[in-house]
């Protein structure tokens, strides 16, 4: 089927971070779906959603929002008031609003999406866990810590039961839970949560993955906030090593761990090492 061929190729380009090649394919797939199946078909709704996802990834929110809304309207009309596909549309539109910090617009959509997934897929569905995690993050951003913690714990419990204790979604929610604890200066709880996330991420993605690097940065910040500069130094050195393996030794991405290490060395009175880190920052390629 022409639609599926176009859509699948577009998905490949999107995953390869080549949006300029994905976009015309998504647009053509959308036209094919509308011409072959009609303007109210669920196939068209899927095509609209996929193109909207591409625009959201590019932060082209103005282009994405009407596509999400039209996809949602088609699905609601074609599939009835409750379906997993409609829940997806609600969740994606909520993500769009959340990325723009439109909290009041996002919250009811997240809640409706989560409840709809529960009714259509069951309380223990991985998509329920994902929806709970999204709503938890929304509450964390609004400093509604109690509601956020309950939802993160719910998301973790569902993911462990449905997908296994070593699933990446468990690690992601444990990392986010660590951020929640750090926001409240509950540093012991934050450290434990970040460490739990790292164990999973290192096993699933490898010790030198960018995902591991991100969680290590969060853990390093906890050590800095608690004044444990030795542990902070160790964590940032690992982050630097990961960044060098992924991006090379001259990429501007390295400025974050290098600057962090320079500050730590200054606090430790290691002026020579601090100067070396600062000098490396000055030598990085700004265009990378």
Image (cartoon, helix red, strand yellow):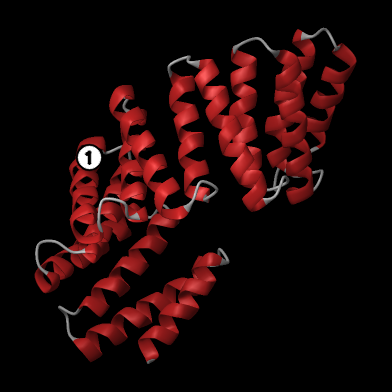
At 15% across and 78% down in the image, what residue appears? 40
> Is 133 on the left-hand or right-hand side of 107?
right
Mark 1 lies on a secondary structure that is helix
Residue 176, how many percent across, how many down?
A: 46, 34
Q: Quadrant of the N terminus?
A: bottom left
Q: Residue furthest right?
A: 272
Q: Using the rendered image of the protein, determine whether residue 285 is visible from the camera's viewpoint.
A: no
Does 99 sit above or below residue 194? below
At 61% across and 11% down in the image, what residue appears? 226
At 47% across and 72% down in the image, what residue appears? 11
Does 34 sit above or below residue 94? below
Does 172 sit above or below residue 1? above
Q: Using the rendered image of the protein, determine whether residue 39 is visible from the camera's viewpoint.
A: yes
* Disc 1: which residue: 107
Residue 164, how many percent across, how many down?
A: 49, 51
Q: Residue furthest front?
A: 161
């Amino acid at each position: 089927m022409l639609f599926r061929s176009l859509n699948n190729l577009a998905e490949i380009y999107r995953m390869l971070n080549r949006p300029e090649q994905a976009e015309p394919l998504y647009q053509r797939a959308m036209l094919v779906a509308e011409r072959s199946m009609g303007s109210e078909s669920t196939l068209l709704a899927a095509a609209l959603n996929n193109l909207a996802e591409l625009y959201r990834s590019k932060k082209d929110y103005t282009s994405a929002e009407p596509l999400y809304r039209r996809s949602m309207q088609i699905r609601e009309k074609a599939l009835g008031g409750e379906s997993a596909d409609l829940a997806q549309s609600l969740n994606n539109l909520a993500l769009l609003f959340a990325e723009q910090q439109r909290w009041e617009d996002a919250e009811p959509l997240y809640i409706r999406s989560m409840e709809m997934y529960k009714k259509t897929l069951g309380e223990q569905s991985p998509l329920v866990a994902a929806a709970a995690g999204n709503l938890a993050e929304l509450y964390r951003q609004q400093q509604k810590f109690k509601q956020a913690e309950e939802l993160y714990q719910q998301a973790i419990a569902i993911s462990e039961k449905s997908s296994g204790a070593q699933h990446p979604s468990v690690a992601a929610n444990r990392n986010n839970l660590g951020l929640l604890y750090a926001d409240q200066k509950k540093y012991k709880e934050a450290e434990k949560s970040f460490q739990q996330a790292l164990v999973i991420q290192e096993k699933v993605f490898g010790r030198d993955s960018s995902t591991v690097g991100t969680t290590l940065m969060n853990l390093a910040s906890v050590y800095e906030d608690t004044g444990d500069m030795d542990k902070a130094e160790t964590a940032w050195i690992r982050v630097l090593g990961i960044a060098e393996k992924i991006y090379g030794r001259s990429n501007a991405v390295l400025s974050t761990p290098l600057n962090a290490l320079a500050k730590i060395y200054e606090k430790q009175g290691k002026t020579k090492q601090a100067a070396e880190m600062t000098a490396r920052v000055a030598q990085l390629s700004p265009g990378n």
